[in-house]
Amino acid sequence: MRRIGGAWAGLTDVTFIEPVPEVRALDMRVNGIVQNNWFNVGRPYYDFWNVGITGKSQIVQVSDTGLDTRHCAFRTSRRKVVQYVAYKDKQESRLGHGTHVAGIIAGNGKYGKTDQRGVAPDARIAFYDLHNNRNNEFAAPTTKKAFHRMLNQGLRGGKAKIHNASWGSEDNQYNTLSSWFDEYMYDNPGFLVFVSAGNYGRKGPNSMGSPGTAKNAVSVGATNISQRRTVVAPFSSRGPTSDGRIAPDLVAPGHAIVSADASSNCGTSMKSGTSMSAPAAAGA
């Protein structure tokens, strides 16, 4: 591979060469902790909700493995999923990652107790499916055109002002994908992107993954749950970035998070990862 890269680098028309990293999905009581650092059972201090901040009139675009729109978390008297751009196989991933992520942001809570509602239960979802179910591959955009098509669907088609990307790679460099996010947000200043920091924390410092290395996007690490909610989870990627920037930008609960389960009509499942902390921050 190095020989091939060296040969290409010698061509006069080649500006730079960069490997395309493998991108994958990074996978209870989140809403209370995010709002007021609350955990004590029976004492729900929902500060945001108590003053009417529930996500009403807000649309969040989610790019992920697919969404089970039949799950009761997304069934409401008004249209909960305002846009669904399906991958060509039109199937939700067997992992149910996208359904779980969307439930953390905007699940209506019909499938459980109040503390299992999404952080913004009245928000609506514009969904962009990135999972090739046939090959069980995460099909993140690899060209600038495909990348812009994804975000434009949410911003212009779905009227979303927030995007959640609970996926990424181990590449800790400021690479092309990270620069695409930065450029898009610079060109669209009213559009805010939340990205997972990565689940490579056991590598220690400098373990941020891309696009968590982007400069304009909000990179989100994960904390533990319950009494250790102020402690960063061991799996959560750490900074600094390879070019010395402080990262991640913030942290949110990402361990043992209960949300909608795609394998049932109204059930829940528990998952951990910065895939869970990013939507908690996006919902807030």
Image (tube, rainbow, N blue to C red):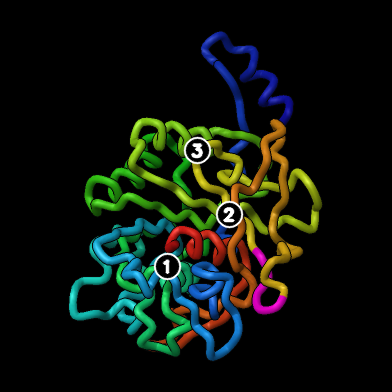
| Three-letter residue code for mark 2 | Val
Marks 2 and 1, how far apart at CA? 14 Å
- Compared to residue 232, the image places residue 214 above or below, namely above
Q: Position of residue 177 (x, y in %)?
A: 52, 38
Q: Amino acid at mark 3?
A: Asn
State the SS at label 2: strand
Q: Is residue 22 visible?
A: no
Chain-order first, disc 3 or disc 1? 1
Residue neighbourhood size for the residue with mark 1, other residues' Cα within 10 Å, grouped as few (<14), some (14–19), many (≥20): many
Which part of the image, by quadrant, shows the N terminus?
A: top right
Q: Is residue 203 visible?
A: yes
Q: Answer with the quarter of the image where residue 63 lies.
A: bottom left
Tell me how far mark 3 sits from mark 1, CA to CA: 21 Å
Residue 216, numbered circle: 3
Position in image of residue 200 (x %, y %): 72, 55
Q: Which residues are magenta?
A: 223-227
The residue singled out by tag 2 in the image is: 220
In terms of secondary structure, where does tag 3 sit?
Answer: loop
Measured as percent of width and height from the top left, residue 85 is found at: 29, 58
Q: Position of residue 276 (x, y in %)?
A: 55, 66
